[in-house]
Amino acid sequence: MKQFKTIYFLFITLLFVLLFNFPMIEIANKNSYVLGIPTLHFYVLVIWGLAVFLLYFISKNLFKSKKENE
């Protein structure tokens, strides 16, 4: 189970690295606004927030299970 969580953690990390790569940033780089915020800034803010939340949640569960096994 620990190995599955580690692989899941790495998969999510790589997914967010790809979302912050040039082609995806270029798609969001438009001359429009979302909720009064430029689209590019909104995209980066949302993706960054999701990355922080998901990686925190996964790592919290990963380290919790490590402490229980010790």
Image (spheres, rainbow, N blue to C red):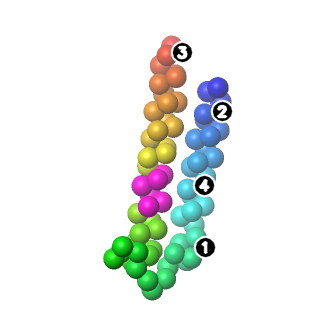
Q: Position of residue 30 (x, y in %)?
A: 49, 82
C-alpha distance separating marks 1 and 2: 30 Å
Check residue 69 in the rendering and tell me which mark sits there, or answer none: 3
Is tag 4's residue or tag 1's residue first in the polypeptide sequence?
Answer: 4
Above or below for 11 versus 26: above
Amino acid type shown at disc 3: Asn
Few, some or many residues within 10 Å of mark 3 (<14, 14–19, 20+): few
Check residue 4 in the rendering and tell me which mark sits there, or answer none: 2
| Labels 4 and 1 touching (C-beta < 8 A) | no
Check residue 23 in the rendering and tell me which mark sits there, or answer none: 1
| Callout 1 secondary element | helix
| Labels 1 and 2 touching (C-beta < 8 A) | no
Q: Residue furthest front?
A: 35
Amino acid type shown at disc 2: Phe
Few, some or many residues within 10 Å of mark 4 (<14, 14–19, 20+): few
C-alpha distance separating marks 3 and 4: 29 Å
| Callout 2 secondary element | helix
| Labels 4 and 2 touching (C-beta < 8 A) | no
Q: Is residue 7 left or right of residue 19?
A: right
The image quadrant of residue 33 is bottom left
| Labels 3 and 4 touching (C-beta < 8 A) | no
Is tag 1's residue or tag 2's residue first in the polypeptide sequence?
Answer: 2
